[in-house]
Image (cartoon, rainbow, N blue to C red):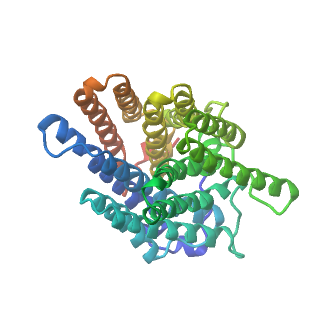
């Protein structure tokens, strides 16, 4: 992946602000250990209890949000040739995901969502200031409209949850809708928006054009906005008694968008095993939702294909590429380290074990232990490859293609 020339403000910034992924990606993995490790402790040693609410918050609003912050804080200033995150923006990104996870672990769910809401507003403002800056050197692709819209959808989800508490139990569907917008809609939107640039660039070396003021660009942005409304509406259908239709709409939208903006039907042509992992992970979104549409009673199987095979694998795969490419390890980027193969195989194992639980609820303990252990081992393989290289300059044999 070619790294665009940084702006003067970006080039002169300290490393922790110029390359925020160095702090935020490892933080995300640590939060994933917290979110998944408690299941391993319960299953193996009987310590604690199963907590689906804590697990979902830790994984989505902790682990994945730390990766999203690391990527956006690194990529957006480079793409737009603007300025890096301010110290206070870095402080919010470093504090909010662990604070949200900690509050969820203590059962303080309202406080957890308040911490997360501050992060959403910070990210929304961060992106909009750089996307709309008059002195920006470049404009992001049209598909980047999904980035601020995804944050708006997540904030709307928080609003729906808050509104339900004031309206009474007969409006509980609003709470359910808000959760779905936060736990699924946010990252589906981010993957479509960021994937429109990252997937073709990373897998095939094809850079999408910048947005413009022309008619074609305006029409594309209008289409993206209409698709975003369709994504939001698919969750309304699901919560209002038509889950199969809601899942089907989501499967069709994700497939059409990833084919249209990322040309997902074209396989990777650049060397590097992680590119195949990222490409395959993107397919897990439409495939997982398609399974959920075909069998709504066992939708959790398809949803975990989306969550683990899609969201988590994409975060770890793209995080791996960003760390190596920005760290100067271009030679290693074009190879196939054993850790990448282990990462893919273990994530596939975790996905299969968690999906199998839907069909074998009598095997709750062994399947959850297998899924948790596979996921944690996958992150260990990720750490084994990247942790020594996050701050260390690349040696010649790993720097040269």
Q: Position of residue 338 (x, y in %)?
A: 37, 31
- Is 329 left, or right, of 380 in this rendering? right
Can I make out residue 96 in this image?
A: yes
Residue appearing at x 39%, y 28% in the figure:
355
When asked about the image quadrant of residue 9, the answer is bottom right
Residue appearing at x 76%, y 50% in the figure? 223
Q: Is residue 375 above or below residue 75?
A: above
Residue 175 in view in this figure: no
List x then y, in percent, for residue 259: 69, 36
Residue extending farthest to the right is 215
Does residue 124 sit above or below 21 in this rendering?
Answer: below
Above or below residue 239? Residue 17 is: below
Give the image location of residue 210, x and y in percent: 74, 57
Q: Is residue 384 left or right of residue 143?
A: left
* Viewer-side residue, 204 vs 114: 114
Using the rendered view, name the quadrant where residue 10 is placed. Answer: bottom right
User: In x, y percent, where is residue 54?
Assistant: 31, 51
**How many numbered callouts?**
0
């Amino acid at each position: 992946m070619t790294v665009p020339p940084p702006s003067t403000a970006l080039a002169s910034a300290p490393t922790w602000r110029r390359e925020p992924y160095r702090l935020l990606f490892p933080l995300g993995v640590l939060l994933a250990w917290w979110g998944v490790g408690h299941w391993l402790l319960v299953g193996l040693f009987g310590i604690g209890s199963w907590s689906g609410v804590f697990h979902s918050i830790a994984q989505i609003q902790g682990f994945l949000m730390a990766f999203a912050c690391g990527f956006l804080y690194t990529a957006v200033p480079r793409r737009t040739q603007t300025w890096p995150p301010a110290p206070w923006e870095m402080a919010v990104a470093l504090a909010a995901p662990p604070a949200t996870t900690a509050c969820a672990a203590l059962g303080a769910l309202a406080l957890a969502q308040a911490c997360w809401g501050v992060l959403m507003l910070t990210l929304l403002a961060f992106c909009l200031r750089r996307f709309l800056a008059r002195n920006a050197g470049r404009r992001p692709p049209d598909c980047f409209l999904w980035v601020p819209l995804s944050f708006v959808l997540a904030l709307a989800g928080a609003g729906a949850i808050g509104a339900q508490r004031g309206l009474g139990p007969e409006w509980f569907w609003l709470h359910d809708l808000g959760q779905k917008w936060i736990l699924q809609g946010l990252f589906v939107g981010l993957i479509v928006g960021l994937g429109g640039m990252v997937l073709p660039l990373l897998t095939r070396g094809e850079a999408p054009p910048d947005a413009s003021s022309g008619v074609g660009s305006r029409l594309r942005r209008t289409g993206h906005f209409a698709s975003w409304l369709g994504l939001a509406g698919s969750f309304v259908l699901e919560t209002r008694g038509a889950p199969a239709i809601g899942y089907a709409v989501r499967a069709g939208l994700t497939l059409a968008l990833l084919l249209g903006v990322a040309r997902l039907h074209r396989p990777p042509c650049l060397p590097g095993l992680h590119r195949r992992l990222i490409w395959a992970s993107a397919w897990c979104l439409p495939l997982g939702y398609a399974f959920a549409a075909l069998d709504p009673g066992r939708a959790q199987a398809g949803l975990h294909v989306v969550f683990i095979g899609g969201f988590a694998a994409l975060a770890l795969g793209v995080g791996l590429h960003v760390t190596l490419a920005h760290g100067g390890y271009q030679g290693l980027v074009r190879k196939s380290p054993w850790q990448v193969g282990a990462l893919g195989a273990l994530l596939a194992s975790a996905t299969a074990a968690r999906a199998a639980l839907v069909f074998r609820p009598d095997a709750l303990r062994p399947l959850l232990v297998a899924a948790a252990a596979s996921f944690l081992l996958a992150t260990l393989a990720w750490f084994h490859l990247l942790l020594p290289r996050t701050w260390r300059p690349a040696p010649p044999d790993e720097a040269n293609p």
